[in-house]
Amino acid sequence: MPAALRLQAMKILVIGGGGREHALVWRLAQERPAHTLFCAPGNAGTESLATNLPIAAEDVPALTAWAEQHRPDLTVAGPEAPLCAGVADAFEALGLRLFGPTRAAARMEGSKLFAKEIMMAAGVATARAESFADARQAAAALPRFQLPVVIKADGLAAGKGVSVCATRPEAEAAIREMLVDSVFGAAGARILIEEFLEGEEASILALTDGERIALLPSAQDHKRVGDDDTGPNTGGMGAYSPAPVVTPAVAEFVTARVIEPVVRELRRRGIVYRGVLYAGLMIGREGPKVLEFNCRFGDPETQAVLPRLDGDLSALLLACAEGRLDPGALRVRPEPCVTVVMASRGYPGHYLKGLPIGGLDAASRHAGTVVFHAGTARRDGAVVTAGGRVLAVTACAPDMRQAVERAYAAAAEIRFDGAHYRSDIARRAFARE
Ligand code: AMP
Ligand code: GLY
């Protein structure tokens, strides 16, 4: 691609309002010449770098109407909901470039059953599973699985559709909740009963234009709310990159035996996958197996991965959207990066919003540190909490230990009532040293 083209300033819309989207906006804002950035709806962190638009990330008709009027050169979709609802298709129909898969391709996340089918057809290693729409038949199948067993809603359930069940009665209750009580609505009208996999989890995010692929640096999320992976599941309490469990051999395996075959199998079915294909992996004794796919950047993985990318992110994303990705254009810095999520009291359960946040400027002055806003808003000029996950305090350093020290030193500067965070982010990386 001619350099002149790559350096053109663009009008870019980022869809979403969490820590991932602040990281995207922050990264795009570093490029020169400067882009004109918009974020829908954004948060109190994106507002100094982009124009926040009062449009919800899920409101595809309003996003499309705005884009038709303002003709952004590039749109980057953060969350899965608009992608699964067809925002990429709507933008394509207007001749607009959007980074993210079409509705048909986004089913890799939107339907766990579809993802299983593709994996089976493509020969990708994953947990054995059976699918059911009838609670009695599902319960009758339980003896075919060892304990613990995993019960999953087929559709999108805001990250809550997975139950790891230690006992048969627990599994029966999870089946009933989904298939009889419909706690996840239509998303739980079909379920998967799945074999429990043991090992260490890692996230591999691959950029793809539907043909070529480029792996982003590996990362590891921390899903449980408490230290040592205790307590309930959350959207993610912190992440670090690189994840040492993703050795070069694992990365090669995932490229050749997971991402490439999936993209090829989709293409064989007439589905061109353009965007990020995120493989959630369990790396155990039998090698990496896929737990799930996501059709988007991970949150909080993105906050730890994007600070490590060199070069123009916009050029990479646009190349994916236009079907001309050059995997050699992806360049990664060696410095590791850590992000620590600060959450509201009560999260992942009920929590209050609107609490004032102090110490943000002091935290941001630490070397190598950036505080991404996740659930924040501005009220009467002050930054207040507006979500369960409030901030992602992020630091890069020459080595992982220093990055961790930096992130925690910055987090210690920040105050809001009930703030809590894990104190062991990236500890697994040290354990492998
Ligand atoms: P998912 O939404 O599929 O990523 O599931 C959420 C979390 O549940 C994963 O990050 C794992 O920690 C756990 N999980 C899902 N499927 C399995 C499985 N088959 N075996 C073990 N743990 C699983
Ligand atoms: N960090 C997990 C996710 O983005 O789904």
Image (tube, helix red, strand yellow):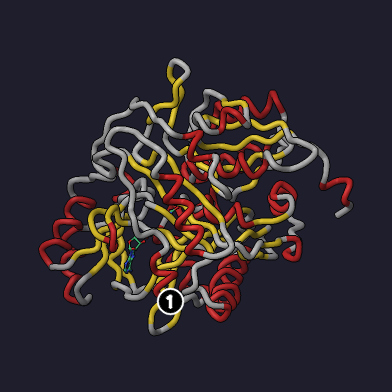
Amino acid residing under circle 1: Arg
Front residue (pair 420, 57): 420
Q: Is residue 207 left or right of residue 61?
A: right
In this view, the residue farthest toward the bottom is 286
> Where residue 198 sits in the image (x, y, percent)?
32, 75
Residue found at x 52% / y 50%: 303
Mark 1 element type: loop
Front residue (pair 100, 361): 361
Q: Is residue 342 above or below residue 139?
A: above
Q: Is residue 63 above or below residue 318?
A: above
Q: Is residue 139 above or below residue 104?
A: below
The residue tagged 1 is: 432
Q: Is residue 107 visible?
A: no
> Where residue 10 sits in the image (x, y, percent)?
76, 36
> Where residue 334 sits in the image (x, y, percent)?
63, 65
Q: Is residue 148 visible?
A: yes
Residue found at x 62% / y 68%: 264
Quadrant of the image occupied by residue 78: top right
Residue found at x 66% / y 64%: 214
In this view, the residue farthest toward the top is 380
CB of residue at label 1: within 8 Å of ligand 1?
no
